[in-house]
Image (tube, coloured by chain):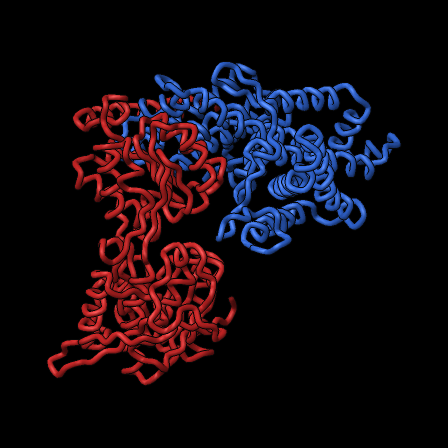
Amino acid sequence: MMKKFLSILAVTALALAMCLTFAACGNEETADPGSEPGNGDFKVGAIYINSQNDTAGYTYQHHAGITAAMNELGLNPETDLIIVDEVTDSAAVSAACDTLVEAGCDIIFGISYNYIDAMEEAAAAYPAVIFSHATGNRANETNFNNYSGRIYQAHYLSGITAGLKSLELGNNNIGFVSAYGTANAETCSSINAFTLGAQSVNPQVQVHVNIIGAWENEELERSLTQDLITTYGCCVIAQDCDSAQPQLTAAENGVFGCGYNSDMTSAAPQAHLTAPIWNWGVYYQLAIESAMTDPANFIADVGNYYGGLADGFVGISPLSDNCVAATQGYIDAVSSLLISGEWDVFSGVKLTYNIAEDGTVTVNQNDAALIDAAGNPIIAAGGAPIADEAIAASMNYFVQGVIPHNN
Amino acid sequence: MGKTRIRIVKRDGCAKRKKVLMYLIAIIVALAIGAILLSSLDVNPFQYYGKMFTMGMVDNHIAYRTVENYIKAFVPLLLTSVALALSFKIRFWNIGGEGQFIIGAIAATTIAFTCGPSLGPGLTIVLMLLAAMLSAGIYGGVIALLKVKFKTNETLLTLMFNYIALYFLLYLGETKAPWNFFLNPESERPIFGSFADIVSFPTIMIGKFSLNLSLLFVIAICVIIYIYLKRTKQGYEISVVGDSVGTAKYAGMKVNKIVLRTIFISAALIGLAGALKVGTSGILSTSITDSVGWTGIIVAWLAKLNTIGIFVVAALICVLDTGSTIASSTYSAIDANFADILQGIILFSVLVADFFTRFKIVISKKEEQ
C-alpha cells in the first residue's frame, strides 16, 4: 500500500516537474527582474496597506499613480518598482524599508500615516535613499518628506453638486458618512468644505454626519448611510471613506450621492453625482523625476508637498447625468477661482452665484465670517484664508450647518 | 458485488527513513504546485525559490539587517510555540495565544511608559518582563480556573478571550484621551507612541550586526523548559496528567493544581514573548502578534510538542515567512497574499505527510451479505 502511495506521489511530482520545465522555457524571452541586480537602473520602492493587485480603493489609487508616473518617465513598473504590500505592523514597516533598500530602491514611498515612525528611522539609517511619506507631517533636511493635498477643495465642488441637487429635490437634509470626524483634520476639513460648498448654492442646507471610526468597514458604511436616510431623511449622501457602500445604499433607497476616491458612477449609476478624487500620479511623477535627476536637492526641489486643484493633484470625477443641468457651469466658475488662487474655501469670503439664461454662471464674492458649529467666529468677514498647516494638521471644529450625530 | 470500504487505521510506528522521505515528498509536491502557479504568472520559480530560501541574503550589502529582522520574528514565535506545547501536553487546548501575547505586550508597554522615565532602563526591563508574565499568566489562568471549577470549555473561552484582548488593544490605539499614555502626544491623529528612547532591550554589536539579546534569553528559557519537562517532578506530573487524568488521580496527584500551575506558566511565557516583541520594536501596534498565537499551534504540533523539535520547526517557518515577503517584493506579479498561499500549500502538504506517518488508509473489499 505504502509503495503504491509513494509511486502515485512520485508520478505526480514528475508530471509537475515537467510542466514546470515547460513553463520555465516559455519564460526565457521575458525580462527577468531577479537576474540583473544592481545594473544602475533607477528603482522605486513602495509600501502598501492592502494588496498591489487591488482593483479599487486607497492602495489601488496610489499604485495606479506610481505606475502611471513611472511609465511617463520611461521606467518599467514590472522591473523597476519593488513593492512590499499588506503592511500594517510597525515592525513590518521597518523590515519592509530594509527589504526595499536591499533591493536597491532609490526612492521609497509609504502610503499609510502609521508608517511615520519607522520611515523616519529608516531615513536616518539610509541617508542615500529618499523616503517619502503620504499624509504625514514629519520631514528632515536631506531625504525624508511628506505629501498630501487640498482634498477639501474637491469636497467643496462636490458640495456644490449636492447642494444643487437638494434645491431641485426641495429637501435641505444632506448626509455625510465619514471615517472620522473632528479627530482627524483631513476628514474634518473635508466635511466642512463639503458643507460650505452645499450652502453656497442652498443656504438652508444641513449636513448630517455619521462617523464610522475606520477608513474601511463596509457594514458600518452601509448601516450608517441607511440611518442618515431613514432617520434624517437625507436626499444626498456624501462620503469620506473607502468603499462604495454609501453609494450603493443611496441607490437602493432612491436617493443620490457623492462618492470618494474614484468615480463611483459605475457602482451606483442611478445615484452617483460626482466624487472627489486624488490624482496621486501628479506627485509621484514630480517626486520620481526629481529623485532621478537631482537626488541631492530632492528636499529643496520637492519639499513637503501639498498639492491642490491648481496642480491637478485633486479634482472631481466627471459629473454624471444625475446632476442638475446647470451644475457644470458652477463647477467651472468655482474651479477657476480656486485654480487662480484668487479665493479659497476656508476664508472670510463666501460665494454666491448668478446664472444667466444661457447657463453661464458668474460668481460673486461676499465678505462673510466663517463661523463654527458652536457659533464662534473662526475668521472675521473679509479675513484671509486659513494657513495650510491649520487645515492639514489641526482643524478640529465643524462649521455652522454641520450636525454630527455620533462624533 | 463487492463493497469497497475505505478505513483510516492508526499506523504502529513508522520508520524514521520513511518519515523523512514522506516529508521530503510533501515539500517537493508543494513546491511543484507553487512552481506551476508562479510560472503561470511569468515568474521563474527557481529564482523565486532561491530568493525565498536564502531570504534574499545572497549579494546583499545589508544582509545583516535581514538577520536582525529574522531574529525579531523568530524570538516571539519560538517562545510562544514552546509555551503552547506546555498547555497541549496536559490536553488543555489553549488557542488563546494571541490574546495572552497582546496582554503581555500591553503590560510591558504600560511599565515602559510609567516607570521607565524614573527607574532607568535596567530595572524597567525586569519589571516589564515580570508584569507581562504576571498579567498574561492571570489572563490564561482564569480560564484554567473556570475549567477546573465549573468544567467550562477552554477551547471556546481561550478563543473568545483573544478578541477581548485584541479589541482592547484597538481601543487603546484609537482613543485620544488625556489618560491614554499609549498614544503619541505629538500626533494629531491617534497613533501609538514609541518608548524606544526611554527603554529598549540590550543588543550586542558584532561589526554592523546588532544581536538582540532576547534571542539568547529565549534560548535559555527553552533549555530551562526542556529540563523542567524531562527532569523535574512537576514535569513528570505534566506528562502523567496528559496521558490520563485517572492515572494521575490514582497516583494521588492534585490534578486541578497541576492544570492551574501549568496553564499559568504557559500563558505567562506567551505574555513574556509579547513583552520581548514590544520591547525590541519599542512601539505597540494593532498587529503586534504577527499571528504567532496561531502559527505557534502549527509549530507545536508539527514538532510533536518536543522542545528541540519546536526550535527547528519555528526556525524553518520563520525562514519561509521572512523569505516569502522578500521574494514577493522582488516580483511585480507577486503580492503578499500570493506569498501566503504558497506558504499555506507548503504547510498543508507537510501536515498531510505528517498524517500519513501516523495513519494509513486501508481499502478492503467485502462481499455483500
The image shows residue B218 at horizontal and vertical percentages of: 64, 24
Camera-nearest residue between B341 and B321: B321
The blue one among the chains is: B
Q: Quadrant of residue B58?
A: top left
Above or below residue A271? Residue B41 is above
The image shows residue B15 at horizontal and vertical percentages of: 56, 16
Q: How many marks?
A: 0
The image shows residue A297 at horizontal and vertical percentages of: 28, 34
Residue that protrudes farthest toward the bottom in the picture: A170
Color used for chain A? red
Residue A248 seen anywhere in this rendered image of the structure: no
The image shows residue B140 at horizontal and vertical percentages of: 71, 42
Q: Quadrant of the C terminus of chain B?
A: top right
Above or below residue A271? Residue B107 is above
Residue that protrudes farthest toward the left in the picture: A358
> Which residue is located at x 64 percent, y 53 percent?
B179
Left or right: residue A118 compared with residue B93 = left
Residue that protrudes farthest toward the right in the picture: B252
Residue B153 seen anywhere in this rendered image of the structure: yes
Left or right: residue A116 compared with residue A155 = right
Left or right: residue A153 compared with residue B352 = left
Q: Quadrant of residue B46?
A: top left
Camera-nearest residue between B253 and A307: A307
> Which residue is located at x 43 percent, y 74 percent?
A400
Q: Quadrant of the N terminus of chain B?
A: top left
> Which residue is located at x 43 percent, y 62 percent?
A188
Camera-nearest residue between A113 and A261: A113
Q: Quadrant of residue B227?
A: top right
